[in-house]
Structure formats: C-alpha cells, structure tokens
Image (cartoon, helix red, strand yellow):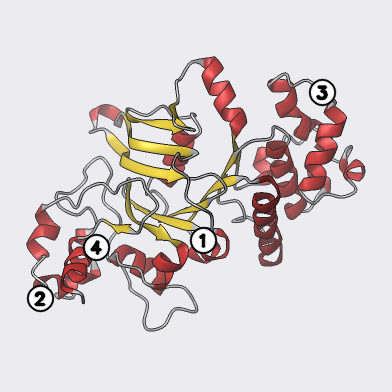
Amino acid sequence: MTTPSPVPLLSAQGLHVTFRGRHGAAPVRAVDGVELDIRPGEIVALVGESGCGKTTLARSLLGLVPPTGGRVSFGGKPLTYSSQALKAHRRRVQLVLQDPSGSLNPRHTVYDAVAEGLRIHRCGGDERAMVTEALSRSGLRPPERFFLRYPHELSGGQRQRVVIAGALVLEPELLVADEPVASLDASVRGEILALLLRLRAELGLSALVVTHDLGLAWNIADRVAVMYLGRIVETGDVEQVLTAPRHPYTQALLSVLPEAPGDPVILTGEPPDPSRVPPGCRFHARCQILTTGEAERTGVAGACRAEDPGVLEGGGEAQVACHWARARTRTGT
C-alpha cells in the first residue's frame, strides 16, 4: 500500500462535464460534481457500468474534454487549457486505450509507433535509445527484433505492450488506462496487469485504471472509486470496498462475480438518462434496499427518494453516498 501524500498527483475538484442535448433536449450531465484524488505511486480503479461517465471523467482528467465546472489539478496546480499547457500535461499523463489494434497505425512499424510521441513533443536525445528502453520496459525483448514489425504481425498482448511502450517513452508520471485488458485473452490479461504493477514498482508510476471488471480492480488497485450516473458513490481501499461494500450498487456489482457467495442481485431497469437525473439518491429507482423494504424498516426510504446524499470528498478515506449505509454506520448495524 502506498504512503499518503499531502499533495495529490492528479485531482478532480468539483468536476462537471455537461454536453449539450441534441435537437433541443436537456443537457447531459455526464460528470456531475466529482471529487477524486490520485496520489504519487498509487493505482486507483474507477469502476461502474457502461454509460456511467467513467470514460468522460478519464478524458477530462487527461485534458481531452474541458470541464464545464470545477477543475483538474496536477501536482497541486490547476490545469489550464492553452495548447502549450495541454501539450505539457499530456506528456506527464499518458493514455493507454482498450483496443491496441485501434490505437496503432497499421502503416507504422513498431519503432515509428513508439517514437511518434517523441517526435510530436520534439524531445531531444537519442531517439533509438529511448525507443529501445521503452520497448524493453514493456516486456518486448530483445527490442530490436520488433523495430520493423507491423501491428498485424504481432499478437494482441504484444500490440498492447507496444501501446504501453509508446506511453512510457515520454517518461510520464501517470497512466490513464481505459479497459486496458478487456480485448485480451485471459492468459495475456494477467501478464499485462503484472507489467503495470512492475512499472509502478520500478518507475513509481501512478495509474487510473478505468474498468467495469471488479476482479481486475482487486488484482491491481490500491483504491477503488465506484461511479454511477456521473457521481462517485463509494470509494476506499480496494480490500475494504470489495470485501465489505457499503453502497447497494457496489454490492450488486460484486454479487454477480462467479466467486461471490449467495444469489446475484439483479438490478431492475436501466440507469436513468443523465439528462434527467432523478431527485434524491440517483440510484434509488433501481436500489434493492428500497425494493425489498429494507429502507422502510431502517427509516431512510423518504430520504432515499427526496434527498441527494451529496458529493464525496476527494481524499483517500472510505466514503459512501448512501442514506441507508450511513444510517447503518450510525446505529452500528
């Protein structure tokens, strides 16, 4: 476990990203008041269903999507959106995408793919030596054997390693990995996760891993942030959140894992439209605590339907945005 730092490496502070609705429709609140810190040397997993806002949040942290409210800070300094500031930020915070085939230009050799970032940022020094070191760190050895290969000549795992090498060559401080192993075979997934952990140990890299896979979060993360309908609804150390989840949404996500005890929790309906966020807790229309009557018995059903549980703070301590979970904490149940 990493030692907490007084200054987060990267943080979102009251972050909002709202998109204009189509054909006069209401604006879409994709990210709706998020507070999130990533400390130096820490791996944070951002988990949740498709459409909950994970990727939009990640892209905003990268500076690819400007926020409509709040701010992003790196090393305690707010991110500005001039072309020069964004270019510098994107060198320090590198993106690793889900599909390596889509990330790599099929007409570029491995060497050119890895060297592309050096050329964009006009980095000085020995380009060949830097590409060689990045490929070696990503596990492609001997690196020279891969220089003249094209993406179609590589396995899926090798292509993902090339993508990671292209990020490493710029010596970033943080990786944002969006579903980094979703397209890979099970045997290769473990190798790529082990690589990310090794890079953290050797280089002190931090990472935000965006995933819907709680098993992946368990294997790689120090902390977990669970996202639902544009908000972080539960956060804390990975063991704390995944072995004793407090939010009904987190409990439902964990219940469908193959190794989970008991019957899976089947959530009713689809997540609400982010252009029409419901009053009260934004999860209440699907919440098993309400549908089973447990919220009535604990006296929080009215609050669930009418009172917003609020935005969680960005610190690393365990937090939950749930009236029922907070009531249980107060009563010690």
Q: Secondary structure at mark 1?
A: helix
Query: How far apart are labels 2 and 3 at the CA level?
Result: 67 Å
Look at label 4 and name its amino acid. Arg
Mark 1 closeness class: few <14, some 14–19, many ≥20 residues within 10 Å: many
Residue labelled with disc 2 = 297
In this rendering, does residue 314 appear at all? yes
Q: Secondary structure at mark 4?
A: helix
Q: Nearer the viewer, residue 79 or 306?
A: 79
Residue labelled with disc 3 = 125
Say above or below: 154 vs 301: above
Camera-side mark, 2 or 3: 3
Camera-side mark, 2 or 4: 2
Query: How far apart are labels 2 and 1 at the CA level?
Result: 33 Å
Checking the image for residue 217, the label placed there is: 1
Residue 112 x, y percent position in the rendering = 80, 31
Residue labelled with disc 4 = 286
Look at label 2 and name its amino acid. Arg
Look at label 1 and name its amino acid. Ala
Look at label 3 and name its amino acid. Gly
Q: In terms of sequence position, does the residue under pointer 1 or pointer 3 come before the other? A: 3
Residues at marks 4 and 3 touching, judged by CB atoms closer than 8 Å: no
Q: In terms of sequence position, does the residue under pointer 2 or pointer 1 come before the other? A: 1
Q: In terms of sequence position, does the residue under pointer 2 or pointer 3 come before the other? A: 3
83 sits left or right of 66 in the view: right
150 sits left or right of 171 in the view: right
Camera-side mark, 1 or 4: 1
Residues at marks 2 and 1 touching, judged by CB atoms closer than 8 Å: no
